[in-house]
Image: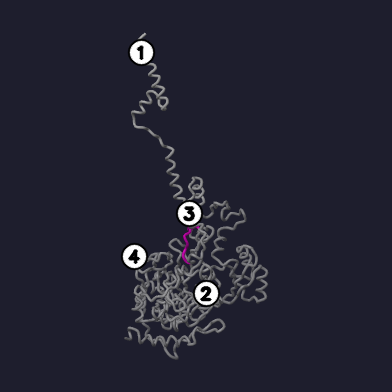
Amino acid sequence: MACERSKWRIETASALIAALLSVIGLSGPAAAQSIMRTPEIRIAPRVPSVSTNVGPRVNANIGGAAVARTPSRISVTTHTMPRIGVQSTLPSVRYSPNLHRACDYAYRGSDGECLERPVTAADGGSGGQAAGKKAKSGSVKSGSAKGGSRNNAQTAADFRAVPNELVAEIDGALTDAQIEELARRHGLVRVEMQNFPLLGSTIGLFRITDRRPVDVVRRALAGDGRVRSVQLNFRYLLQDQNPAPTEGDPAQYALAQLRLPQAHALVRGMNVTIAVIDSGIDASHPELANTIADTFDAIGSKEGPHAHGTGIAGAIAAHARLMGSAPEVRILAIRAFGATANGAQSSSYVILKGLDYAALHGAQIINMSFAGPKDPVIERAVAASAARGIVLVAAAGNAGAKSAPLYPAANPNVIAVSGTDAQEKLFSASNRGNYIALAAPGADIFLPAPDGKYQITSGTSFSSAFVSGIAALVLERDPSLKPNEVRSILTGTARDLGAPGRDDLFGAGQADAFAAVSAVAAPAVPLASGKDAPVAPARDNTSVSRAMEQPAPAMAADKSAENDVKSPAAQ
């Protein structure tokens, strides 16, 4: 009996213990094991919450919305992020028209401009990896016949040329009435037409009056027996960075690099005429006093002077607080560039008018600080100018390392000039290529600006201007030199930069004015003066506005006499 009671007590105690353990949520042997070891509290659900906090921080920096904290909003913001550079909605006016924007090379035209659609290398663009790919919006492939889209070549040409305009060489025997009939037959409006003695041709500018594709109209017009050639009216861009003009009278590092002071002790460009085909020049600027011999407005503009044209003239002929490369030259100021929303621009037809005028009015050198695509009519005009013995100098372009060759610099008759900086390194935006002949300073150049002001500006435009002036020094030394001889002297005396020997960055090297002038034997007979001085270029009062009352030869003679007294050689 006592044993049964003892057994009952043990069982009752065990039951009470078991009941107590069940109340606190533990059981038997497992409960003891759990109590003995370090608690394993699992908090796995908290781990994803960390990534949730990280995601919104990234999203807040991108989208600017601090409230986007849910995973769904993060996902939406990430998928709608724009492609930087390629599809930028910033207006083009914020960028220089002469330096490429931050866009893929597939979207960059041959003149460095960012296009709205990708182009292939065959179209004149410098890229092509994105051409022909289907856009995210579902548009058909570029060049496909689907959807009525035009091919890539037509699209690229549209952006490189003035819309709906054609330049056509017409049979010179046609009467005015016959030309009007020709235009009506092809649905065109004659904008302008004239005879170009430089080419011995009659060339007109026509505009398409309906929505027909330019290429269709061009082919139809070219098939007319009265038309000799037809092309697009290509666009040209000045090659500078267009910063805002600033006051100042700083030292010019270009003078020492080009060794201009030493060269000026021998020659200063007297009796040499340089045509500057550019934007408007401020002839009243003190730096250009008695320098602008004639002016011709090829666009019929009422605009005032422009910073680019004034700066180019200053790089060539400044002679007050600053010093140009040829301070005694005569300048034919030819306005061929007019202001647009994207900067000063010109076209094939206007450039042709400028080249024709320069050749007919005694230019010995033509400075072309602009760039564009390869252009058949301009190629003809450049070749004809060179055949007349005119030295042609052009900016290599500011489209960068991967740009296709730009024209007219890439024409073999032209001296193409790339840009350098104060450390004699290549200007970062400068074009490169096997067509580069020389290099000259083009970064942070101090030059005159309209209204008596000064500017700090950059671009291969000004590199070209410096070399045009040095060419004038060489021609003053020996006016009988031919264009190829002037080129040989400039490249043969250039100071080698970069890799030894000729290269695609600097060409033959940086121009050396003193070495170039010294390489030319001084003429045995001094240049004539007074009544025997060379006759000034013929003046056509219907198309030329005289910048100053004094005749050009008298200005050059007066200025030369004054400079002779001040020159180091005279002292």
- Residue where numbered disc 3 is placed: 64
Q: Quadrant of residue 260?
A: bottom left
Label 4: few (<14), some (14–19) or many (≥20) C-alpha neighbours in 10 Å: few
Residue farthest toward the top in the current orientation of the protein = 1
User: Residue 449 shows which numbered tag?
Assistant: none
Does label 2 or label 4 sit earlier along the sequence? 2
Earlier-in-chain disc, 3 versus 1: 1
**On the image, numbered disc 1 is attached to which residue?**
6
Hey, what amino acid is under mark 3? Answer: Gly
Q: Residues within 10 Å of mark 1 (few under 14, many from 20)?
A: few
Q: Which residue is mark 4?
A: 500
Residue type, label 4? Pro
* Picture mark count: 4
Crowding at dot 2, Cα within 10 Å, few <14 / some 14-19 / many 20+, comes out as many
Amino acid type at mark 1: Ser
For label 2, the residue is 336
